[in-house]
Amino acid sequence: MAAAVAGADALREVLSAAGGGVGNTPPPIVCPGHTRPLAEVAFSPHTPDGYFLISGCLDGSPMLRDASSGDWIGTFAGHKGAVWSAQLCSEARLAATGSGDFSAKVWDAVTGACLATLEHKHIVKSVDFRGDRACLATGGHEGLARVYDVERGLGARRSRVVLHQGRRRRRPPPAAINKVCWTPGGAPLLVCGAADGRVLARARARPSASPVATLECRSKAGVLENVMDLELTDGTLGPTLTVAAGDRVHLFDAADWGRVRRAPIDCPVHFREEGGASLRPDGRELVLGGAAATAARARAL
């Protein structure tokens, strides 16, 4: 949620600096450097040094940039496979990446040094820092969501908690986790989106307890669809969880987890293998990207 607000603020700064406005939108800033498709881009919240942008790419070389100018700051070198996820902490002093080399890494975003390599048993598809940066969550094809205690030390034996294990199908392994994200506030929940069509919200303080909420994302035919992307926002509609699954977008109330914001939205693209959706702060439009699309599409609500 904070990242979405930060992204909107950063974009306003860029438009203001370029003299943009209604009817006078400047051309987009092009940020060259990557050699393969991008898997994830994320703005930092506002910091005393401005806004930053981190990008995870299938070329295995995540990059950090000045979000206002697009200028390259540095490349985090060390992964041996595609980087599927890249995130900055709230102060933009730490970065985390998840990779196809079966590891997540934590970096010093100022010096570029690798602070920790967190070994996994399969591809890591998603990483996310909690708002207070005290915890880092990871999820991926292993079907587990792990939480690492950043304050205690990422290498400490007790720093890791398995917070969610994907629902097992008739045959192992459990369903892959494609996305993890933290809710904001004083008692944050970890939200996990899995390939079995379910979204679970769990509290780190009670990892063995039942989920706070279990949400299902179904197709028109009632079949559970692969959850590819999650986004938490707090705009006109209130706290909202946007979920991209199959060829539909689902909007859930992120304050009252049992409530659906509106009926599932059928989309002109599908999210079975890639893509995602983002809700405009005023709740009037979705931006979609996925298979069968060569550019992002807007969908009025």
Image (tube, rainbow, N blue to C red):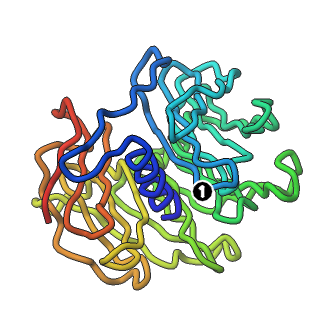
Residue, far front? 19
Query: Would you call the spot at circle 1 few (<14 residues within 10 Å), some (14-19), or many (20 or more)?
Result: some
Identity of the residue drawn at 26% across and 58% down: 224
Q: Position of residue 2 (x, y in %)?
A: 53, 63
Q: Which residue is mark 1?
A: 46
Residue type at tag 1:
His
- Single out the residue that lies furthest toward the top: 35
Q: Nearer the viewer, residue 160 or 72?
A: 72
Q: Is 252 placed left or right of 123 in the picture?
A: left
Element class at badge 1: loop
- Is 3 on the left or on the right of 130, as rendered? left
Which residue is at the front of the view, 20 or 120? 20
For the residue pair 140 and 236, the one nearer the viewer reads as 236
Q: Tell me what residue is drawn at x 58 percent, y 28 percent.
A: 63
Residue 78 in percent (x, y) is at: 70, 22
x then y, percent, for residue 223: 20, 58
Q: Position of residue 41 (x, y in %)?
A: 47, 39
For this view, does 208 lie left or right of residue 143?
right
User: Which residue shows up at 19% across the image and 29% down it?
Assistant: 294
Residue 256 is drawn in which quadrant? bottom left
Please say if 29 is above or below 271: above
Image quarter (top left, top right, bottom left or bottom right) of the C terminus: bottom left
Lateral position of residue 27 relative to residue 2, left or right: left
Point 50% across, 45% down: residue: 42
